[in-house]
Image: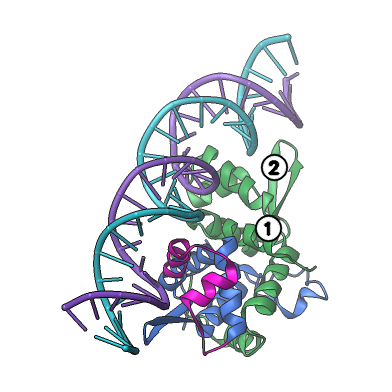
Chain colours: A blue, B green, C purple, D cyan
Amino acid sequence: MEMNSPAAIEALGALAQEHRLALFRLLVQTGQDGLPAGAIAEALEIPNSSLSFHLAHLTRAGLIQQRREGRSLIYNADYEAMNALVAFLMENCCGGQDCASSAAGGISTDQSERKTA
Amino acid sequence: MEMNSPAAIEALGALAQEHRLALFRLLVQTGQDGLPAGAIAEALEIPNSSLSFHLAHLTRAGLIQQRREGRSLIYNADYEAMNALVAFLMENCCGGQDCASSAAGGISTDQSERKTA
DNA sequence: CTCATATTTCCATCTTCATGGAAATGAATT
DNA sequence: AATTCATTTCCATGAAGATGGAAATATGAG
């Protein structure tokens, strides 16, 4: 479940786009049952071909998964991948502090984590 | 410290690039003192003009800050911006479930991925 | 087998991003 | 004001991302 830099870059890039971020949020809210591509296209008002492009992008990044049910392709968010991404950001980009919980209270000025380049 | 979608997209996009992710991690590790552009260019082995482009990108996204000291421009990570980004992801993209706790649980003990190159 | 449905792939086009050398800017020193 | 140092901006170029209509593929129904 550990995420490395290339995988993190892929995931960050996948979320760094208006339609894809909205799409991923929709799938997260929907839960494990997921949604068929058609329902997503309707909800987000994106042409099928564009949606398919974005779905493929998120799938390649490992953030969503696909399964077939009848003639529908159902997509659902991969929560573990998201957990891994957040964990990566907190480990590597938050100065070793508990970034999330300190969001409200501010952060310590002590930078204890120093890696010798 | 609430972050909205456009700001999150900007921040995600800024981090979704090899050199910029490495650059931001370097500044996070360095701490509040920051580093002058020249030292960053040397550490990351990036030409000055390219580095300047990436520094501007991260600055525009609000993830780093700039100050002048003599003839050097010193850059430092903005921890609050990073906190806000992680908070945004956890609120909007983790379904409000185990994401925060499992990520926080992983941060303390799991250190398998190291920046080796 | 044919038809309707669901979604993807193909393709052309447009925009944005990344790169790095050269010239320009800003700041201290003499 | 001339010089040196640190960094940015300019510019051209190539690579990658985004868009959406039309054709193709896959599945199920009659």
The image quarter containing residue A23 is bottom right
The chain carrying label 2 is B
Which residue is found at the position 81% from the left and 75% from the top?
A: A104
Q: Which residue is mark 2?
A: B73
Asked if residue B42 can be seen in this view, the reply is yes
Tell me: B98 left or right of A102: left
Does A43 lie within the magenta span? yes
Secondary element under disc 1, as helix, strand or loop, is: loop
Tell me: B98 left or right of A81: right
Q: Amino acid at mark 2?
A: Leu
x and y percentages locating residue D8 in the rendered image: 64, 36
Label 2 Cα crowd, 10 Å radius (few <14 / some 14-19 / many 20+): some
Rounded to the nearest angstrom, the CA distance separating label 2 from label 1 is: 16 Å
In the foreground, B35 or B107: B107
Tell me: B97 left or right of B19: right
Residue A117 disc label: none
In the foreground, C8 or B84: C8
State the extent of the magenta-drawn residues as a range.
A31-56
Residue B63 disc label: 1
Tags 2 and 1 in contact by the CB under 8 Å rule?
no
Q: Main secondary structure of the magenta part?
A: helix
Which residue is found at the position 43% from the left and 73% from the top?
A: A59
The chain carrying label 1 is B
Answer yes or no: are tags 2 and 1 on the same subunit.
yes
Q: Amino acid at mark 1?
A: Leu
x and y percentages locating residue A72 in the rendered image: 41, 82
x and y percentages locating residue A25 in the rendered image: 61, 75
x and y percentages locating residue D28 in the rendered image: 33, 89
In the foreground, A64 or B42: A64
Which residue is found at the position 66% from the left and 70% from the top?
A: A95
N-terminal label among 2 and 1: 1
Secondary element under disc 2, as helix, strand or loop, is: strand
